[in-house]
Amino acid sequence: MYAGLPLAFALWRAGAQVHLASLSFSELELIDRDAWVAERVAALRPDTTSPDWHFPERTLARWLAAQSVFGMCVGRACRTVGAIGRTR
């Protein structure tokens, strides 16, 4: 996911809608219930909570928010940009 950031930024600058995704090794079963958008798929935001110390997807979401890149909503009415993880 991190390796794709240069391409994602280039696409965003070109006006494309971009979704970042990864197979997660974090313990996603511990995250907020509201983060789950489909079976085994979670949309992670800067404020997603988890007691798991290894949570690079949230770290990226926080960094993107600090860069004013992260879309803070999920749904068809807004542009969503964020980290999506899938449990093992």
Image: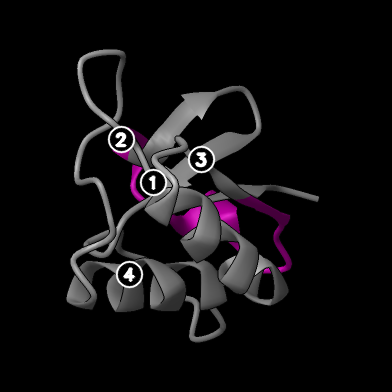
Amino acid marked by disc 3: Ala
The disc at residue 81 is 1
Q: Which residue is mark 4?
A: 64
How packed mark 1 is, by other alpha carbons closer than 10 Å (few <14, some 14-19, many 20 or more), is many
Q: Report how far apart the C-alphas of labels 2 and 1 lie in the structure.
A: 17 Å
Give the camera-side residue of 34 and 20: 20
Amino acid marked by disc 4: Leu
Q: Which residue is mark 3?
A: 42
Residue drawn at x 57%, y 55% as measured from the top left: 28
The disc at residue 67 is none
Q: Secondary structure at mark 3?
A: strand
First along the sequence among labels 1 and 4: 4
Quadrant in which residue 63 is drawn:
bottom left
Q: Are marks 1 and 4 in contact (CB under 8 Å)?
A: yes
Residue drawn at x 29%, y 31% as measured from the top left: 79
The disc at residue 34 is 2
Residue drawn at x 27%, y 64% as measured from the top left: 46
Q: Secondary structure at mark 1?
A: loop
First along the sequence among labels 3 and 1: 3
Q: Report how far apart the C-alphas of labels 3 and 1 lie in the structure.
A: 13 Å
Residue 81, position in %: x, y?
Answer: 38, 46
Q: Report how far apart the C-alphas of labels 3 and 4 lie in the structure.
A: 17 Å
Q: Report how far apart the C-alphas of labels 1 and 4 lie in the structure.
A: 9 Å
Amino acid marked by disc 1: Val
